[in-house]
Image: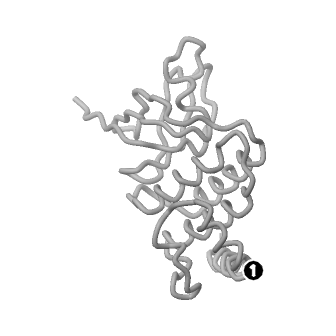
Amino acid sequence: MYQKYTTEALVLGAKESGEADRTLLFYTRDFGLLRARGSAVRAENSKMRYAVQIYTRSFVSLVKGRRGWRAAGANAVHIAGRDPLGVSAFARIAELTVRLVHGEEQNEYLFAALAEAHDALMRDHVESFATIEIVCVARVLYALGYLSAEALETALFTHTAYAGEHLTEAEAMREKLLASINRAIAQTQL
């Protein structure tokens, strides 16, 4: 018998498979980045259908078998918002995260940075989506070791909040942040 794990996850991607199946790409609080097969999640009567839509934050139940992970259940915490600018900003963050993270490895800071950015970007009306995206990308790079907090001399990496005063601090150093982000991405050679 296989053990069932329940964890909070962000759905960063999905690939259609068969008539109603889907291969899901999760970034989880407990396991990091993983792919899981979702059987019949595209079926109209599926209970998981809305909880595993792309860019949704959910609690998922996962089973690890011989052939990899399988999604056994899911409950949505926060679905993708209606503001297309916020959704597209999170899509770019998700794409970068998938490119840079390799294998399953727990990273609490990275999950918190992504989850907080998801909450901030998936509101009905996002005003500072560009700044939130820049700060989140910087935090992703910092969490993965591509960016040094000392190099930027800022408190942005001591927490994962995207509140007004933090975004004001990021706006003040926007050019420096962008230069550091571009340099770090170029060094990854991906």
Q: Residue at x 68, y 60 (%)?
A: 133
The reply, left or right, for residue 17 in relation to residue 33 is: right
| Position of 175 relative to 41 (above/below) | below
Q: Amino acid at mark 1?
A: Glu
The reply, left or right, for residue 5 in relation to residue 26 is: left
- List x then y, in percent, for residue 162: 58, 60
| Position of 81 relative to 120 (above/below) | above
Seen from the viewer's position, the closer of residues 126 and 20 is: 126
- List x then y, in percent, for residue 151: 56, 88
- List x then y, in percent, for residue 21: 56, 25
Q: Residue furthest top?
A: 45
Q: Residue at x 63, y 78 (%)?
A: 184
- List x then y, in percent, for residue 65: 33, 36
Q: Residue at x 66, y 74 (%)?
A: 185
Quadrant of the drawing holding the C terminus: bottom right
Quadrant of the drawing holding the N terminus: top left
Across the whole image, how many numbered discs are drawn on residues? 1
Q: Residue at x 52, y 16 (%)?
A: 46
Seen from the viewer's position, the closer of residues 154 and 68 is: 154
Estimate how packed mark 1 is, as few (under 14), some (14 to 19) or many (20 or more) residues with alpha carbons within 10 Å.
Answer: few
Seen from the viewer's position, the closer of residues 184 and 149 is: 149
Q: Residue furthest front?
A: 165
- To which residue does mark 1 refer? 175
The reply, left or right, for residue 150 in relation to residue 130 is: left
| Position of 94 relative to 136 (above/below) | above
